[in-house]
Amino acid sequence: MKFKDKVVIITGATSGIGEACAMAFGKEGAKVVITGRKQVKIDNSLHRLQQEGIEAMGVLADAASETDNEKIALETIEKYGKIDVLINNAGISMRALFEDLDLDVFKKVMDTNFYGAVYATKYCLPEILKNTGSIVAVSSINGYRGTPARTAYTASKYAMNGFFEALRTEVMKRGVHVLVASPGFTASNIRNNALTADGQSQGESPREEDKMMSAEEVAAEILKATIKRKRDLVLTKQGKLAVFLNKWMPGTMDTLVYNTMAKEKDSPFK
Ligand SMILES: NC(=O)c1ccc[n+]([C@@H]2O[C@H](COP(=O)([O-])OP(=O)(O)OC[C@H]3O[C@@H](n4cnc5c(N)ncnc54)[C@H](OP(=O)(O)O)[C@@H]3O)[C@@H](O)[C@H]2O)c1
């Protein structure tokens, strides 16, 4: 019970990696606070957590809203008296060529993925400093390597990586742990919900989800890395290779990534 009586907030925990993290940390004794944009999805996740004997609370909150993020911190302190760990997980993706992309869609992705993490961190940091706790950023391999037709998503993850690297260094002498976790392709709803050029949900995944890492496997790795207070976590063999090759052979990677992504179902480029 590595997180007995610790209070762990997980943003966007009504499905996928977020819900799996709530389960994983909860099974280690944490009191978990989950957030999402739909009350019914929060209630369903709370039910699944409580069935496992996990103490959990839900907060209806849009990651893109500063006031909602303040509310998450305030309601957590009101109910549990403290915050030990914040997992910045809420995120959405997009898929369209930049030339076709409505800039409101670009902004929505940045507001959710990047500013959502900034706001939540801002309001939870005083408590995490007090408790020398952990801040986890659920980034992506796209935080190291861009993907065509995912410009806004890539930008949001690079921004997260830069923000958390700077913050980690800022608080390094104050006992706070900052982990940037970068999953590779993981089976979840993210590709179904990815936004198209005009902001509609894509409604299907262009990839074979059953060949991917599961959200539970990713959550187990995030749990381990948080316990060990690791700096970075890069997942999947393909993800590790992409990060390595992009550092040393970025030009070759441009061609490789183009050719690979062009083969995706309904790719907007050939
Ligand atoms: N799956 C992958 O292949 C993959 C790879 C690398 C990184 N990631 C990252 O992992 C994180 C989780 O994604 P996932 O794959 O688990 O996707 P998912 O199954 O679609 O889960 C996304 C979660 O975020 C929540 N969310 C979305 N927009 C939100 C908003 N504005 N405010 C609050 N909550 C919001 C969703 O809840 P509601 O819809 O109920 O609001 C849901 O609980 C994301 O940051 C994603 O970028 C995923």
Image: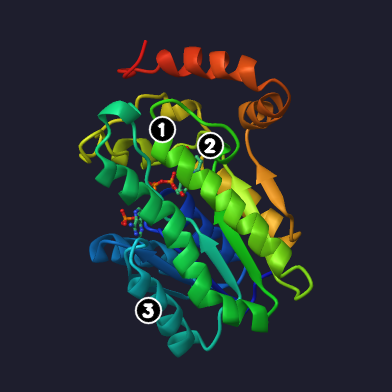
Q: Is mark 1 within 8 Å of ligand 1?
A: no
Q: Which residue is mark 3?
A: 71
Relative depth, front residue between 257 and 88: 257
Label 2 CB sits under 8 Å from any ligand 1 atom: yes
Q: Quadrant of the N terminus?
A: bottom right
Q: Name the side, left or right, on which 145 lies relative to 77.
A: right
Residue at image position (66%, 26%) is 246
Residue tagged 2: 142
Tell me the amino acid under the disc marked 3: Lys
* Mark 1: amino acid: Arg
Q: Residue at x 53, y 57 (%)?
A: 21
> Could one spot residue 220 in this view of the protein?
no
Please say if the residues under marks 1 and 3 sit with CB atoms less than 8 Å apart: no
Q: CA distance from mark 2 to mark 1?
A: 9 Å
Q: Earlier in the sequence, mark 1 or mark 3?
A: 3
Tag on residue 150?
1
Real-space Cα distance between discs 1 and 3?
31 Å
